[in-house]
Each structure stands twice: as C-alpha cells, then as structure tokens.
Image (cartoon, helix red, strand yellow):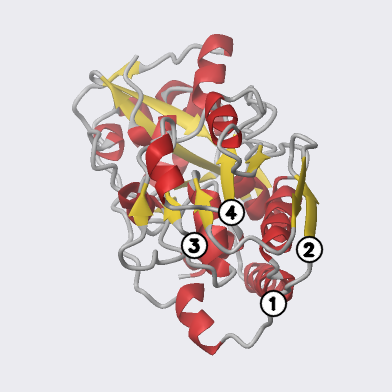
Amino acid sequence: MKISPQTHLRKPVFVLASVSAVCALTLSACGTTSTDASADDGSSTSTSEACADDSSTTSADPVSVKDDTGHQIDLDKPAAKVVSLEWQYTEDLVSLCIDPAAVADAKGFTTWDTAEKLPEGVTDVGTRQEPNVESILSANPDLVIIETTSRDDKIVGQLEDQGIPVMAMTGANGKDPIGYMKDTFSTLAEVTGRGERAKTVLSDFDAKVEESKKELADADLPTKDFVYFDGWVNGSNVALRPFGQGSLFGELGEELGLKNVWTGEVDPAYGLGQTDIEGISEVGDANFFYTGTDDPESEDYVELLKKNDIWSNIPAVKDKRTYPFPSGIWTFGGPKSSEQALDAYVEALTK
C-alpha cells in the first residue's frame, strides 16, 4: 500500500494497518462539493517574530530532567545548541526563542508547520525517519531531541556513544493529548532554561482556548458534531484517517464545546483511525474538517472525493459543511500549532 507523506509522517499509520486494513472504495465520476482549501491569510503573528520583543530570561542553573522513557538527563547548564529530529520539537524550540542548531527535514517543516518560521540557514540533518548521524555530530550539539518510544532506538545509541545527551520523547499520549502537548513544551523549556518564556506561551494558549470557546458558544450552530480527518490516495482509491478520541485535534475541538463523533477504532497513543468514504459517511450530520495542506508528493485526495457518489450524498457535503483548515497547520504540533487549529475551528463555523 502506498502511504503518502502526510500519513507516514507519524508511526501510528503502520500500527493501524495491522489492526484495521484500509477498505478503500473505488471512485466513480459524479457530483462535486465545496471543499477547496482556504488560504492562510497571514493574520497570525509567529512567535519567532514575537521573540524580537521577548524580555524573558534564560536560566543558567544546572538541569536535571527526565524524558518520556524515564531517562535522567543531567547538564551543568541548560542546553543551548539543540538538534531537533521531529517537527513538534522544532516548532517548540522556536516558540521558546531558541534557534535550533540543526533540524530534521527542514523543507518538510516549512510545508507542514507554519506556526513558526525556521531561522535562515539552519542545518538540515536529513529525514526524521533516518537522520544523518555525521551531520548531527557536525552541529556539535549539547542535546538532541528525538521522538521514539524506546531508548533502544539505533540513533539514540549512536549519539550516546559519542557522548551526546539524547532526550527521547514519545510524541503523544491518547489519555490527555492537550496536557501532553503542554507538558512536552514545558519539558523542552526546562532543559533549555526557558521556563519563563514557556509560561508566557502556555498562558497565551490557555487564553486562546477561552476566547475561542466563547466565540463558538455565542454562535448559533446547527450541530456541534464533527469529525476531523486527513487522507491519501492509494491507486484510484481514497483512504481516510479520522482523528478520534485521544487525538490532539479531536480534543481541541471538544475543548471548544464541539463533539467528536468518530467512534471507530483508533490507536491508543495518537487517537488516529482508518476508514474509507463509506465508513466516513456513517457519522450522520456531523461537520467535516480536514487538513488543507497540499501534499507535494501525492495526488490530491480531496479532488477524488468530489467525484464519488457516496461522498456527494453525505449531509455535510450536500450542506457545504466541509471545512479545510488553512495550509500548514501541523496536526501534531505544539502550543502555536494548536492555537492555529483553534482559530481554524472558529473561523470555519462562524464565518
């Protein structure tokens, strides 16, 4: 099965494939729907720009932090030259007003995560799945942050053999995705001595939640039911990935008073499911939200959806209640990506 970059950006798609096979439906040419992606109007100010006026201090105290695997990281002083091997941590570092020493897949980051702007000339150490160890070492880091569930990961061993401290983060927690996102941000702030800055960013996020919640509470919504999804093309078929209970974007929607009605099987960490057009049609009158980022390496699955009989007869499609999020909102990001998602929910339902 061909997996598009958007679906293999995270490991759960492979886990799910062994649990529930994708039952893709062959497409037939008929029907259209209003599913054109919205353009980002550029109204949100990136934190990297905000950092020019940032007055928060950086701690110089020794650091003692446990990563998600329980490994203790002890540093004589906060990490200053940090290499990030996952987009969420790249975003978080820039939100903390830290220029990463190097990152994995800088080009992909600029496509999928617009919450922050990478500093010009940042070193790219290769893909997130297989970063180049020599490139990482050339950045002379005092910390590398990687997403993995085990310290047995080959990259971890190779870096630690060279005396490089490695912080291993699992990337998600389906029991409390919003809390985990915030805790991850705070952990990165602690290890880099940027706790003061982190409090400001998280306070801004909490304020955004309350503001967005009020805006939707004041709106006269025909339904609060929703499903958020992304997808990919497999041959002439479309496979869809709903963000169910335990997903960050699903929980952000529910935080606003909406109801995530995807009840299909999901993986326990990321809350992601798999289905086809027929499966997504079973959610009743729910509103549809989906990623508006154009995948540069895959056929547009939304265009194929428009040609399908079943899709065109789904209530949300017939009533034009299918809402693309603006391009570049990373579904597995930090506080600033989450703020973008909150804005997207509100804009879609109140415009």
Asked if 216 appears above or below 226 in the picture, the reply is below
The residue that disc 1 covers is 200
Q: Which residue is mark 3?
A: 344
Q: CA distance from mark 3 to mark 2?
A: 40 Å
Q: CA–CA distance between discs 1 and 3?
A: 22 Å
Label 1 vs 3, first from the N-terminus: 1
Residue type at tag 4 = Asp
Residue that mark 2 sits on: 62
The residue indicated by pointer 4 is 142
Residue at image x 77%, y 38%?
71
Taking depth in this image into account, of 176 and 163 the one nearest to the observer is 163
Q: Earlier in the sequence, mark 4 or mark 3?
A: 4
Left or right: residue 79 compared with residue 2: right
Q: Badge 1 local density, few (<14 within 10 Å), some, or many (20+)?
A: few
Q: Secondary structure at mark 2?
A: loop
N-term-proximal mark, 4 vs 1: 4
